[in-house]
Amino acid sequence: MTEYEAVIGLEIHAELMTASKMFCGCRVVDSVTAPPNTATCPVCLGMPGMLPVINKRAVELAIRVGLALNCTIQRHNIFARKNYFYPDLPKSYQISQYELPLALDGHLDIELASGETKRIDIRRVHLEEDTGKLTHLDKDSQFPQGGTLVDYNRSGVPLLEIVSEPNIRSGEEARAYAVKIRQILRYLEVNSGDMEKGVFRVEPNISLRPAGTETFGTRTELKNLNSFRALADGTAYELVRQAEILDAGGQVVQETRGWNESKRLTFSQRSKEEAEDYRYFPEPDLPPLEITDEWVESVKLTLPELPDTKRARYMADFELSAYDASVLVEERAVANWFEHTLAVSDVDPAPSPKSIANWMINDLFRLMNEHKQGVADIKFEPAAFVQLIGLVENNTVNNNTAKDVLTEMYQSGRPAAEIIQAKGLAQISDETAIFEIISQVIRENPDTVAAYLSGKDKLRGWFVGQVMKATKGKANPEIVNRRLAEQLDQLK
């Protein structure tokens, strides 16, 4: 059997979070929840004689993305008509960019499961308008012949297309690249990343060639992938399918294919078009888009610290592990919340960044996951969170009690000190009191003491448990362990 090399390029379509559409004043609405065909006008419906106008905010957001992806921003842009006939395009053409796109020649570094870093080159980033949304009907009593419904609310929404070079070599690499693009777009606040609503869509172009050769094979394109798992699995399946065809002496057909999640296979949709099939030509109703150096510089000043830079800073400045830093920078809102905790100055002793990170990742995130909520849903401020950790570190409460207090804080929003006082949860650190409780446990359990003295050292943990039970979990564990060891050693 021939050994093949996968050649994969990704096209990512991301709707931009603007208030109005790309070429008209219609508002951008949720394509899932908004009543169909209520956010339309003669321009986005393609009525005769209507003239488009470029959305400046969409251009600014596109420049943000181009800069973040290390692209060169083209100062001279041309919009073009991309002609094809389909029910979701009321004009029978899409206004896009072709020969002179907004940004070129970028790159993005991704981390692989092996720990290695790989650079994926980005060919272009260009602006266009989205199409309408089609709903295909099964035959039923209301629609006995079946059919297709079209909603033009989405038609004309600003759409950014990010096209990689074909230097991706597996479904997992494709997934890692797409995940990172989505993360960056969310950091830039240009796209919500909601794949279920179709505002972030990924389409891989996949082909095989004999290993060691440079000539590209015939490619297929997977459409309508609504998850990163579908991207990885659909790509992996397609690579196997194409290899089987080539090994059998056949030829791969250039086409667009879909992914059937339930059957775990790809299926043919239509033959794949080439650029000449779209008959691109400059949009006669729009002037060239000129982007000045001053405009690019002003946009550059608005860029946030991006995930890779933030992760490296957390590791260097706060001595966090690579894992902890990666978890905290996954979402910009979470990273902001973490940094707000570090700015709290009225807690003495101030918890270390590592301690705060541990409490966030292990305990706060657990509560968020249990309630299926995000950081925006937390009812208390970062300062209250730091104050709770401070109460642990100054021995007011122990770790287990603090976890219970955090749960109450999450549910009610009440401050930690108030909960601790109201429920009498303050930690017992009085050494004399703890000594007396230990003595009582030893007096009441002579048989267990005898077993311990005979060599069953593991019973020391049982004594600790009895002391904590007697104090309802409020005894200082460090003092309990130290004073218990002293008393048991005296009995030997």
Image: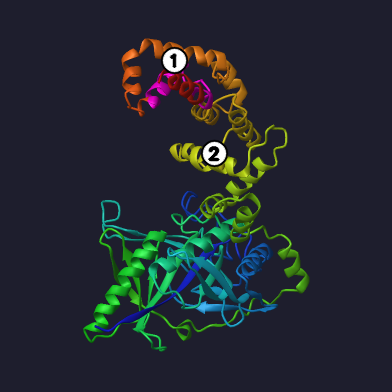
Q: Name the residue: 67% across, 62% down.
A: 57
Please state which of residues 239 and 485 is positioned toward the viewer in this rendering. Answer: 485
Residue 55 in sight from this viewpoint: yes
- Give the crowd class for mark 1: few <14, some 14-19, many >=20 residues within 10 Å: some
Q: Quadrant of residue 169?
A: bottom left
Q: Does the magenta run of residues contain 198?
A: no
Q: Name the residue: 45% across, 84% down.
A: 277
Q: Quadrant of residue 64?
A: bottom right
Highlighted range, magenta: 460-480
Residue 48 in sight from this viewpoint: no
Residue type beneath disc 2: Trp
Q: Secondary structure at mark 2?
A: helix
Q: Secondary structure at mark 1?
A: helix
At which x and y percent is residue 269? 33, 72
Q: Is residue 2 above or below residue 355?
A: below
Which label sits in the foreground, 2 or 1? 1
Please state which of residues 235 and 170 is positioned toward the viewer in this rendering. Answer: 170
Residue type beneath disc 1: Ala
User: Which numbered disc flags the more N-terminal residue, 2 or 1?
Assistant: 2
At which x and y percent is residue 412? 55, 26
Cα distance in 3D space between marks 2 and 1: 27 Å
| Picture colour scheme | rainbow
At which x and y percent is residue 44? 56, 65
Please state which of residues 185 and 6 is positioned toward the viewer in this rendering. Answer: 6
Q: Which residue is mark 1?
A: 470
The furthest residue to the right: 294
Q: Which residue is mark 2?
A: 359
